[in-house]
Amino acid sequence: MPKTLPGPSTPDASAAGHAAPAPPTGTSQSRAILRLAVPAFGALIAEPLFLLADSAIVGHLGVAELAGVGLAATVLQTAVGLMVFLAYSTTPAVARLLGAGRRADALAVGRDGLWLAALLGVVLAAVGWLTATPLLSALGAGGEVLDFARHYLLVSMAGIPAMLVVLAATGVLRGLQDTRTPLVVAGLGFAVNIVLNFALVYGLNMSVAGAALGTVLAQWGMAATYLVMVVRAARAAGVGLRPDWVGVRTVSRVGSWLMVRTLSLRIAIVATVIVATAQGSVNLAAHQLAMTVFSFLAFALDALAIAAQALIGKELGAGNVTAVRALTRTMTRWGLGFGVVTGLALWAASGGVGWIFTTDVGVHHALAAALVVMALGQPLAGYVFVLDGVLIGAGDARYLALAGLGNLVVYLPLLFWVQAAQPLENPMALAWLWAAFSLGYMAARALTLGLRARTGRWMRVGAVAGRG
């Protein structure tokens, strides 16, 4: 069987006389989306739950320990977050080949993605070990907080290769139209993580290093589980385990564009935090709570986006443009509908949700104002997240990267205006900040994604996405 990524001259499914399946419609279409989206949502919240479990367990050790773990976790989330392309690049590539009836080639692409993840993980871990102390110091850590943050981060570096392998393997399974297995693996990993952390932190008195080690062991257990699955599937399909370096370079090239896209999103979020910090401690606290709410809702929208990646990639691989258009319309409606529902819920809860987190009245007022604005922007967010998933599924990574940079050009001046025009320590200043983010920035993303979706240039059929 072929063991490398097919080149541009390889005939696609339609050219080979391969009959495309009838497009899913009505109930079957909805079931296909839900079958992928619902388990994906559960798997998506696993990583935040890992960090939340660490914070909850470490929180009982002391304030310095908790602050140190929080700072180190921020570094970890940023580093691993930039590597999410390992999942986003393998999902559509595997799905296309699966749709074209070439399962062996799909598994070969997945294998190459896993090799790339392992190599990047080793490099990233080495860099982390060498730069942990100066990096944490640059972020403002000192004294006991710096010591605890360094201990946690240095131990956690051993788990970076496993985290990236998990990302790539999850992308492979999504491309194979399986989001249930990642949910099961993530759930078991979360449970093991809690048990190990309790045992190491309190049973062996290892403090924050024990919390990090427990998470590292859980991550390696998850990575080993995925590797066993992928190896078995590859051998069953006659696919070798050695990497094909042409395939690895192909995955990394697509991934580099997706990394630029992700980096643009991170820059927007960090720039927003910088402006919130300048508004004073009350608004900063309220902003962090508002971002927590936004992030949780984003997981549900991301689940729809993941379903879009898997389904769109598969149908384009099968040459079924009719199904692609139908799925895009359905998921766009679902994204908008979900945004309307969550927006109404946020509006209704905006006045009282602050009591869940704090008793500070000033934070309540600022948070309530931010949530009302966020509620108005939820339909836009639903539209954006779904179309983002559609275009990732189509392999339109280059456009997404360039559009992301263009969106920053629109958003950063809005942030500058908010910082210059709004008085500090004013609850309404945070509302204006969230208007810039959830209305201005999201509107820019909606425009660039919507215009692209209308052109149809991203619907390139066949086993390989090609270049647009």
Image (tube, rainbow, N blue to C red):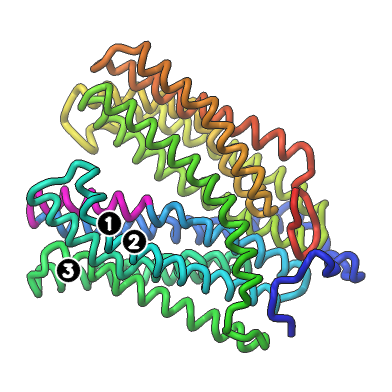
Dominant secondary structure of the residues highlighted in magenta in the image: helix
N-term mark: 3 or 2: 2
Q: Residue at x 13, y 68 (%)?
A: 201
Q: Amino acid at mark 1?
A: Thr
Mark drawn on residue 210: 3
**Position of residue 90 in the picture relative to residue 438 (left or right):** right
| Tag 2 and tag 1, C-beta contact below 8 Å | yes
- Taking the magenta stretch, the answer to whether it contains residue 58 is no
The residue depicted at 32 percent of the width and 24 percent of the height is 368
**Residue interval drawn in magenta:** 61-78
Which residue is at 23% across, 17% downward? 425
| C-alpha gap between disc 2 and disc 1 | 6 Å
The residue under label 2 is 127
Residue 344, given in percent of the width and then of the height, sits at 47, 30
Label 1 belongs to which residue? 131
Residue 416 versus residue 142 in the image, above or below: above
Foreground: disc 3 or disc 2: 2
Kindly indicate whether the residue at mark 3 contacts the one at mark 1 (C-beta within 8 angstroms).
no
Considering the image in quadrants, where does the N terminus appear? bottom right
Q: Is residue 144 left or right of residue 389?
A: left
- Residue 430 in which image quadrant: top left
Q: Secondary structure at mark 1?
A: helix
Q: Earlier in the sequence, mark 1 or mark 3?
A: 1
For residue 53, side relative to residue 396 (left or right): left
Mark 1 vs mark 3, foreground winner is: 1
Q: Who's the residue at 57% across and 69% down the image?
A: 172
* Percent x, y of residue 189: 35, 70
In this view, 218 is above or below 47: below
Element carrying mark 3: helix
Q: Residues within 10 Å of mark 2 (few under 14, many from 20)?
A: few
Task: Tell me the amino acid under the disc marked 2.
Answer: Val
Is disc 1 surrounded by few (<14), some (14 to 19) or many (20+) residues within 10 Å?
few
